[in-house]
Amino acid sequence: MAEIDWDPKGLIRESYQIEGIIESQCRSIFLDWALSIPSGLDTRDGLNAMLAIYGEAQPDHPMTSILEQGLVQICRPKRRGGWRSRDRN
């Protein structure tokens, strides 16, 4: 299987090159990146790839924090089911 280019627009790469970038700007870039991942690909794999490529070299960069937060959010189990009544007669 060919290696997947997880950052075809270069969004994550560019975010690490912007001097003085802040976390809220990284969050916006991250959202654009996440929405551009083709369906059927595991976002967790993309996050791990971006952290390995960029985050390990710049652990204190705000984008590294955003990528790590994204990984935690994806791994957190989601509540299933709809609204439940408190009245359990």
Image (cartoon, rainbow, N blue to C red):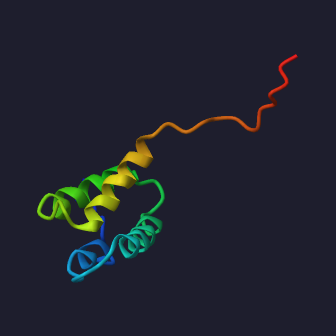
Q: In this view, does 60 lie to the left or right of 79?
A: left
Is residue 2 in sight in this rendering?
A: no
Locate residue 67: give its quadrant.
bottom left
Residue 41 picture location, percent across and down: 40, 54
Q: In this view, does 69 lie above or below 5?
A: above
**In this view, which residue lies farthest toward the top?**
89
Count the marks: how many? 0
Residue 31 picture location, percent across and down: 45, 68
Q: In this view, does 31 lie to the left or right of 5?
A: right
Q: Which of 3 and 76 is in front in this view?
A: 76
**In this view, which residue lies farthest toward the left?**
57
Q: In this view, does 46 lie above or below 15?
A: above
Residue at 46%, 54% in the rendered image: 40
Is residue 49 in sight in this rendering?
A: yes
Q: Is residue 18 above or below residue 41?
A: below
Locate residue 9: give its quadrant.
bottom left
Residue 37 picture location, percent across and down: 42, 64
User: Considering the image in quadrants, where does the C terminus appear?
Assistant: top right
Q: In this view, does 71 lie to the left or right of 5?
A: right
Residue 68 picture location, percent across and down: 31, 53
Q: Nearer the viewer, residue 16 or 8?
A: 16
Q: Which of 13 and 63 is in front in this view?
A: 63
Residue at 81%, 30% in the rendered image: 85
Q: Which of 20 and 75 is in front in this view?
A: 20
Residue at 30%, 64% in the rendered image: 6
